Image (cartoon, rainbow, N blue to C red):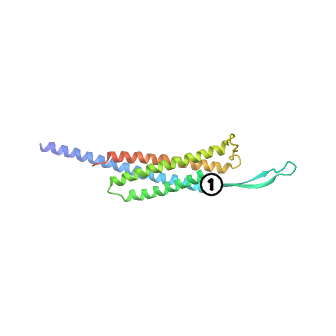
Amino acid sequence: MEVERRSVKKEEEEEEEDMNKNVMLNHMAQMGFRFLGFVLSLVAAIVVGLNKQSKVVPLTVSLNLPPLDYTLTANWHYLSALVYLLATNVIACSYSFLSFVFLLKNKNKDSILALLVIVLDTVMVALLFSSSGAAAAVGVIAYHGNSHVQWNKVCDVYGRFCKQMAASTVLSLAGAVVFMLLVVLASVGLQKRPK
């Protein structure tokens, strides 16, 4: 009888140790993904914020006169979709940093606070996907134009501007995927957390 109790107790201790290892691995993975989300959203915000290109374009007023050289500038804040992309990446970057610090200090693993982090991670997913979609839609119109409403292509004039816009959109999408993985990891962590 005594041997049987010791065996059961040993199995319970091993089970608890395995559970603690899983929780720790989940926590470390979350910290890594949070750092990655921070870096991706920071770089996306920087790329958008520095997106500006000036180009000298010949403007023909009359066929009898020589063309006039006119300097045109494309800037990120001229397009509301890029303003939205910048704002959401700044929000995601700030949140990622704050949640990283919070999770480093949260040793008691309060499930209410963990649930709040999951909800806020989900909000970041929605913000980043929506802003990336808006920026991608504007990018497609800038690249191809729209003949139905007489919108001309602008990427053939502002090539670097369009490439930076595409890069920031891809970085933002990658950040959204990272936050989505955080939601999955945190949900699995809540489910497997010891009572």
The residue at the far right in this view is 64
* Residue visible at 42% across and 47% down in the picture: 183
Quadrant containing the N terminus is top left
Q: Residue 151: give x, y in percent of width and height.
A: 69, 44
Residue type pointed to by label 1: Trp
Q: Residue 104: give x, y in percent of width and height.
A: 39, 58
The residue at the far left in this view is 1
For residue 153, above or below residue 69: above
Decide if residue 68 is on the left or right side of residue 121.
Answer: right
Badge 1 marks a residue whose secondary structure is helix
Which residue corresponds to mark 1? Answer: 76
The residue at the far front in this view is 149
Q: Residue 168: give x, y in percent of width and height.
A: 58, 50
Q: Residue 35: tell me if it is visible.
A: yes
Decide if residue 15 is on the left or right side of residue 37.
Answer: left
Res 87 quadrant in image: bottom right
Decide if residue 91 is on the left or right side of residue 167.
Answer: left
